[in-house]
Image: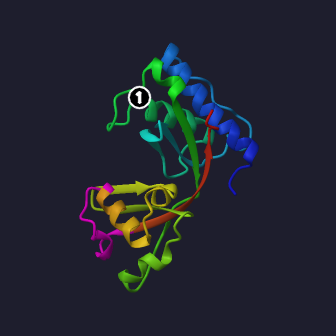
Amino acid sequence: MFISLKDGKIAVRLARDTIEKYINEGIIIEPIKKPPFDKKMGVFVTINKGGVLRGCIGYPYPIKTLGDAIIDSAISAATQDPRFPPIKKDELDKINIEVTILSEPQRINVKNRKDLPKMIKIGRDGLIIKKGFYQGLLLPQVPVEWGWDAEEFLCQTCFKAGLPPDCWLDENTEIYKFEGQVFEESLN
């Protein structure tokens, strides 16, 4: 566990407050300065509407404090995810927010690339795939939601990177895994 349940609830509330203040007033709120929000951590903010993805952006690596990363990711997920139009004021009471705290990604090294699926635990591990200028990331909850096995998870992460689905078999493709701790708003 990266942070406590209590801090996870605070993280989700911070993301919600950030989105509402930014969309309603154009104001960026101040980050929380106390632990663990003052420590550098990777984080993603996911926004769903009616159970369907509406925005998801974050920091896979711990380059910002958790408080700053949540605020930046929340605003970006709500207004800058290129897959969706910006969230409007009338949507705020219809969205559900999820915050995923990430461990630092670790490169997976295997002698035989076909052994890669054995190194991935569905429901625990997220993936990053890099090759050249291409990069794709899928959070640990994605293969669970879609019912994928480890091989399909690898293929889908390649696809997310804009690469052929079997790129994970290529020795020049770098594959990283990370763990995620998910906190979600209670659905009313």
**Prevailing secondary structure class for the magenta stretch in the rendered image:** loop
User: Could you tell me how many numbered marks the image carries?
Assistant: 1
Task: Tell me the residue that label 1 is attached to.
Answer: 79
List the single residue furthest toward the bottom: 111
Frontmost residue, 113 versus 94? 94
Between 64 and 70, the residue placed more toward the observer is 70
| Helix, strand or loop for disc 1 | helix
Relative horizontal placement of residue 35, taking residue 120 as reference (left or right): right
Q: Give me the residue at 51% from left, 13% from top.
A: 25
Residue 172 coordinates in the image, percent (x, y): 29, 72
Tell me which amino acid carries mark 1. Answer: Thr
Q: Nearer the viewer, residue 150 or 136?
A: 150
Q: For the N terminus, which image quadrant?
A: bottom right
**In this view, 20 is above or below 147:** above
The reply to whether the magenta stretch includes residue 170 is yes
At a point 27% along the width and 66% down the height, the residue shown is: 165
Q: Which residues are magenta?
A: 160-174
From the viewer's perspective, tell me whether residue 5 is left or right of residue 74: right
Q: Position of residue 36 (x, y in %)?
A: 71, 44
Q: Quadrant of residue 135?
A: bottom left
Residue 9 lies in the magenta-colored region: no
Task: Please name whichever residue, 79 or 131, is drawn nearer the observer in this view of the structure.
Answer: 79
